[in-house]
């Protein structure tokens, strides 16, 4: 973790830092209720006692936050520092030091003897679902005609297919959505504002595409096209044909919806 002074650094960073970029879910208190406002984040470096993290929303220095890691581990932490050069990068200190980050070969000073961990520091009554562990094939209900679609899906699909404007998204070089058409977001059960700032892998069905390779190809030849399977709210799946072109710092894709599994 990075702190303002040497004294603060020695106080909060009592174990070796390990560079590790992994996704996390951050939950903060709302109206005194812990863990009621979740949003995405990622780690930069980690150690037994805390981490340096990046978040999509600002945090208050001195506040307590709750984390869920991509390994399914949970912990509570205190926000101890905000980097002056990046307002959304924070140093945090775990309330109960332990290897929640899933580092398989931790440094020698990550001694569990120094980390008497609490079995569950999250509130006993959770108001948000646990992170999904692995992709499970959805139960697909097939319809013979559009008339058999549930009303909400049928209306959304009819509105979008009757509109001549293509569904469009713009992604930056960090694979984050910087612009999303409202029609595309609605098919996934979100608003365009909710999707802006999310990473491509946040709404891509796991194991269906090599995202890094696809962007490397586009960077080299200037464009990419094919099929993409998105995952929306409540497990909704959307299969699209896409054509993406690369500009200097962004990728702009036009999407054609082919199939929806509610």
Image (cartoon, rainbow, N blue to C red):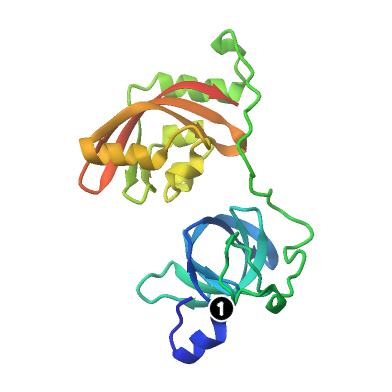
Query: Going 21% across and 35% down the picture, which residue do you hit?
Result: 221
**Rendered-image quadrant of the C terminus:** top right
Secondary structure beneath disc 1?
A: loop
Residue 260 image position (x, y, % from top left): 53, 23
- Where is residue 241, by image quadrant? top left
Side of 58 where 76 appears, left or right = right
**Residue 73 seen from this side:** yes
Vertical side of 88 occupied by 190: above or below: above
Q: Is residue 232 above or below residue 147?
A: below
> Closer to the camera, 24 or 56?
24
Residue 242 seen by the camera:
no
Q: Residue at x 47, y 19 (%)?
A: 158
Residue with the most extreme bottom position: 7
Q: Which residue is mark 1?
A: 15
Q: Position of residue 259 (x, y in %)?
A: 50, 20
Farthest top residue in view: 144
Labels in figure, total: 1
Residue in the foreground of this view, choosing between 35 and 217: 217
């Amino acid at each position: 973790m990075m702190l303002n002074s040497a004294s603060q650094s020695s106080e909060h960073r009592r174990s070796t830092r390990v560079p590790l970029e992994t996704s996390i879910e951050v939950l903060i208190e709302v109206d005194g209720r812990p863990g009621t406002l979740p949003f995405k984040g990622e780690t930069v470096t980690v150690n037994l006692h805390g981490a340096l993290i990046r978040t999509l929303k600002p945090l208050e220095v001195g506040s307590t936050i709750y984390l869920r890691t991509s390994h399914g581990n949970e912990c509570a932490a205190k926000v101890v520092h905000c980097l002056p050069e990046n307002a959304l990068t924070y140093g945090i200190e775990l309330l109960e030091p332990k290897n929640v980050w899933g580092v398989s070969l931790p440094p020698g000073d990550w001694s569990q003897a120094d980390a008497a961990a609490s079995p569950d520091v999250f509130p006993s009554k959770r108001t948000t679902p646990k992170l999904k562990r692995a992709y499970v094939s959805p139960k697909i209900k097939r319809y013979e005609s559009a008339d058999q679609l549930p009303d909400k899906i049928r209306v959304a699909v009819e509105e979008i297919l009757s509109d001549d404007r293509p569904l469009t998204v713009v992604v930056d070089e960090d694979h984050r959505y910087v612009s999303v058409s409202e029609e595309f977001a609605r098919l996934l059960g979100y608003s365009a504002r909710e999707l802006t700032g999310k990473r491509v892998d946040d709404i891509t069905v796991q194991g269906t595409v090599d995202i890094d390779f696809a962007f490397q190809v586009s960077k080299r030849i200037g464009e990419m096209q094919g099929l993409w399977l998105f995952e929306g709210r409540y497990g909704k799946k959307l299969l699209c044909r896409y054509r993406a072109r690369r500009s200097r710092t962004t990728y702009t894709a036009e999407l054609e919806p082919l199939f929806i599994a509610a």
